[in-house]
Image (cartoon, rainbow, N blue to C red):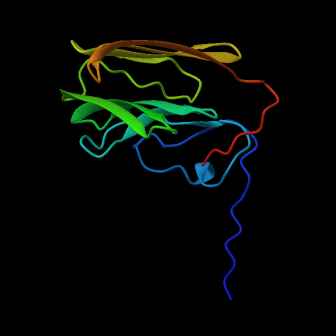
Amino acid sequence: MVINNEREITHPVLLCDDQGQLNKESIGWAKKPFVTSNLSGQFMRKKKWNYWCVFGQDAMFSATISNLDYAVVCFVYYLEYRTKTFYEKTFMIPFGLKCAMPSDVEGSVEVIHKDMGIFFIWNKNHVSLKVDCTDFGGESLRAEINIHYPEKLDTLNE
């Protein structure tokens, strides 16, 4: 029987080497976001995204900014559990223009499109998730959710 024992990463490490290839030291898991995703080269093969989902007893709200090299694709979802009311808004910007994804997990990123703006803004130990949309299910949407991120909080990072 083969057992896969992945190692724990306990110190900062780069995801890629100077040639854009996988750095073997970055393979594993970590309790903190130690891996810097320094992706370079390999045009049309890089995918980076930042996804947030906030939920409670009554509803779920999520926002995503993804850069696929050839396009930026962003979406926002809202689901109300009791009524099963669901709204979704997605937009795409060709060629990944106007979206510089950070190389670290705790980096700010924003995308502004004619129909919607999505902002993930890091400030020390919290992130502000902001969405402004002119037509979200027939109504305007302005959301600002501040998420406290305690320094001693363990997270799963691969």
Q: Residue at image x 27%, y 30%?
A: 90
Q: Residue furthest bottom?
A: 1
Q: Which of 93 and 42 is in front in this view?
A: 93
Q: Looking at the picture, does residue 7 appear above or below residue 52?
A: below
Q: Quadrant of residue 66?
A: top left
Q: Looking at the picture, does residue 74 appear above or below residue 20?
A: above
Q: Which residue lies furthest to the left in this view?
A: 94
Q: In which quarter of the image is residue 151?
A: top right
Whether residue 39 can be seen here:
no
Whether residue 103 can be seen here:
yes
Quadrant of the image containing the N terminus: bottom right
Seen in the image, is 143 located left or right of residue 8? Answer: left
Q: Residue at image x 54%, y 21%?
A: 107
| Residue 154 percent across, percent down from the top left | 77, 38
| Residue 85 percent across, percent down from the top left | 40, 35
Q: Which of 69 and 19 is in front in this view?
A: 69
Q: Which residue lies furthest to the front in this view?
A: 83
Seen in the image, is 32 located left or right of residue 145? Answer: right
| Residue 76 percent across, percent down from the top left | 38, 29
Seen in the image, is 130 located left or right of residue 67? Answer: right
Q: Nearer the viewer, residue 108 or 79?
A: 79
Q: Which residue lies furthest to the right in this view?
A: 152
Q: Looking at the picture, does residue 5 appear above or below residue 72?
A: below
